[in-house]
Amino acid sequence: MRLIINKIVLGLSTLSALIGLAFLGWILITLFMKGLGSFHLSLFLNDLIDGGLRNLIVGQFILAGIAATIGIPLGMAAGIYIQEYGRGKYAEVIRNLSDIMMSAPSIVIGAFVYAIIVVPTGGTSGFAGAIALAIMMLPIVISTTDNMLSLVPKELREAGIALGASKYKVIVDIVIKAAKVGIMTGILLAFARIIGETAPLLFTSETSNYFSLDLTESFPSLTVSIYDLANEPEESSRDLAWAASFILTVLVLTINLAGRFITRNKKR
Amino acid sequence: MEKIFRNLSLSSASLVFIILLGIFITLFLASKDAINEFGIGFITNPNWNKEVSIDATDKSSQSAQDFSLEDDFLADDEDDMILDEDDAILDEDDMLFDDSIKKTFTDYGALVPIVGTLLTTLIALIFALPIAMGIAVFLAEIAPKNIAAPISVAIELLAAIPSIIFGMWGLYYFAPIVADLVGGYQVSLLTAGLVLGIMILPFMAAITRDSMNTTPDVLKESAYAMGATKFEVIKDIIFPYSKVGIIGSIILALGRALGETMAVAFLIGSIFALPTAINSPTISIPVAMANNFGEASGLGESSLFYLALILFVISFGVISFAKLYFLKGAR
């Protein structure tokens, strides 16, 4: 009897793993079928106004790129503070707050940026969208940096200090170098996460049908346009949304796998 | 240089605190109008963007039905007015009446989105919990290492898929099947909750697996040595040992599900009405914001900020409860 129960439970557990895999497979196959069906090279050459996706892809990269340029240095610096300088309660509080911020609803961050940037400046702008994404990215980078630095052996730091290096020198030249690969992986994963975000952009950058590099105007965004297109009644719009979703997913998963690949190679 | 670097990193760290405080203050200020207008009763008010008339004396809202009745009454009066044109007193009376009618205002309440948010999260949790536990057990205890590793990656990739993709897939492929099986609408509490469940599944499974992996091998080995089966080890050794971490991960997943916008936006139906059944459409707080923020102004916009504030406070509370109470020191 005990053995039978054991078999049943183990079977159920394996089944649930298969269910998880089945959902992943189902979503990916759907994306491939629908996405490849409407995929065409001209999507990369035309803007949305001409039935292409060029402006949206470029726009999404610019938004996420600016967000990363703001979020990565700030997040790394904060992570360094928590791990290297912070001794007392304050660092612990910041660490917890950062973890909480990581799970904060992204739509609320969108509303926050709307209130502090979009309302005072009088309209949606690429700049506001990038700030919203940067706020999303900040706690992820902090947590990665914090975790990776904590893996660096204490002896390395002591060796640096024993050689007479200042604390700043030790952090920049020794500790960061030792944790470089891990931090880079984390940053790649963080980038993969924010480039697929929609909710914080809905009312900060909005989207645009035209190619634009002007950050003070509504800015083309792939994800926001997918949302708009998917809700349109015309079949052609929805096909375009599927093609865009396919490109977005391939992009996100590639960055994600690349990040994992870097760590794997390093570990060997 | 040393000082500059230290201060730079200190101020970056403080940024986290400033942003969180900023979010709270900003949302509070932006929802000030709605808070003054509706107070705490906002939470239990099922109206949204509904025109209601108010008496000059009594500021409490009346139902829309009363309003239409009064409208008819007014029309009758106008007929009378034509009949006795000379009667000045009646005319004045009408004017007064007219004034009080014109004083309509738009009523906003959060009950529907709050109920929608809680119910979708609950459905997601009920659906995801057993499967996530199964996956975690499978990865931590059953599968040999060379199988567990790729499956782990696959499950984590499921977590990496953008939520808007879940929404689109859910609407066009998953919901029709569910609606066929259960009946009712394709966009409903049920379909939104299930897709939300699929979304939090990998997240929940990953943290649960990590907590299970903290069980010391010695404990497991001694149980096996006593002749325990794998299931008994899982039930009697691993679960009790990692219970706190597992509960923490469940609450954390719940906190995430509360604030999920895009996947739910496709599937919940976006109707400001209390759900009458599990397969009827309604709306959640994030979706109400996503769909109405663009057009809202004045009191409507302020009410949306009030909703955002409620969502922020709820999820902040839930997440910090999980972090501080259950996952203390778990990193």
Image (tube, rainbow, N blue to C red):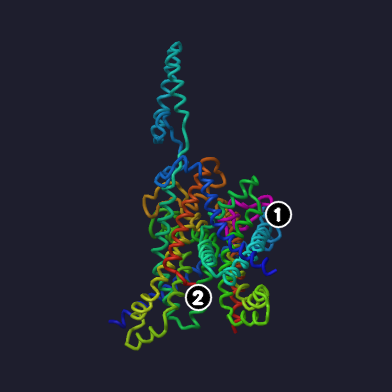
Mark 2 and mark 1: span between their CA atoms? Answer: 40 Å
| Marking on residue A211 | 1
Q: Which is more toward the observer, B180 or A205?
A: A205
Task: Spot the residue most to the bottom.
Answer: B225
At horizontal 59% and vertical 58% (from top left) the residue drawn is A241
Task: Spot the residue most to the top.
Answer: B86
Magenta stretch, main secondary structure class: loop
| Element at label 1 | loop
Q: Amino acid at mark 2?
A: Ser
- Residue A53 lies left or right of residue A154; in this view the side is right
Whether A209 is among the magenta residues is yes
Q: Which span of residues is magenta-colored?
A: A196-224
Query: Dividing the picture into quarters, in which one does residue B215 lie?
Result: bottom left
| Residue picked out by circle 2 | B152
The N terminus of chain A lies in which quarter of the figure?
bottom left
| Marking on residue B235 | none
At horizontal 64% and vertical 67% (from top left) the residue drawn is B6
Residue A256: x and y in percent read 59, 71
Residue B127: x and y in percent read 40, 64
From the viewer's perspective, is residue A81 above or below residue A45?
A: below
Residue A53: x and y in percent read 66, 58
Q: Amino acid at mark 1?
A: Phe
From the viewer's perspective, is residue A91 above or below residue B58?
A: below
The C terminus of chain A lies in which quarter of the figure?
bottom right
Query: Dividing the picture into quarters, in which one does residue A240 lie?
Result: bottom right
Q: Which is more toward the observer, A114 or B284?
A: A114
Query: Dividing the picture into quarters, in which one does residue A48 lie?
Result: bottom right
